[in-house]
Amino acid sequence: MGNSIYKFIELVGTSPTSWEDAAKSAVEAASKTLRDTRVAEIKDMDMKLEDGKVALFRATVRLSFKYQM
């Protein structure tokens, strides 16, 4: 068995309800096209505001997956 290599990407997920749902949507979308996803880390959280109210939660997620050689 050889050494493993992992790649990291950053994604921004959005949700009208919560940061948790925003992060979950980013991971689930990436998992549709990436194999062997391993770890997701929340890098940043912010909100889009409209008329002084929260319109959208955004979560920047750093996701690792095993690099296939």
Image (cartoon, rainbow, N blue to C red):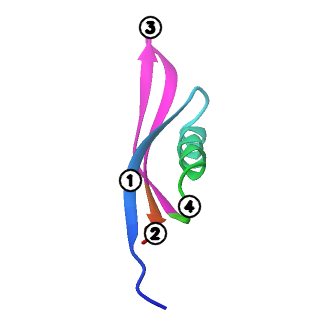
- Secondary structure at badge 3 equals loop
Quadrant containing the C terminus is: bottom left
**Which residue does the numbered mark 3 point to in the structure image?**
51
**Between disc 2 and disc 1, whose residue precedes?**
1
Marked residue nearer the N-terminal end (1 or 4): 1
Q: How far apart are marks 4 and 3 (CA)?
A: 41 Å
Amino acid beneath label 1: Ile
Name which residue lies at 40% across and 85% down.
Answer: 3
Residue that numbered label 2 is attached to? 68
Q: Are marks 4 and 3 in contact (CB under 8 Å)?
A: no
Q: Which amino acid does label 3 sit on?
A: Asp
Query: Magenta segment range?
Result: 39-62
Front-lying residue, 21 or 54: 21
**Magenta span includes 56:** yes
**Between discs 3 and 2, the one toward the N terminus:** 3
Q: Which residue is drawn at 38% across and 63% down?
A: 7
Residue 64, percent across and down? 44, 62
Magenta stretch secondary structure, dominant: strand
Which residue, given by chain and number where applicable, does mark 1 sit on? 9
In the picture as drawn, the residue positioned furthest to the front comes out as 69
Q: Which residue is drawn at 40% across and 69% down?
A: 6
Q: In the rendered structure, which amino acid carries the disc numbered 2? A: Gln
State the separation of the CA atoms marked 2 and 4: 9 Å
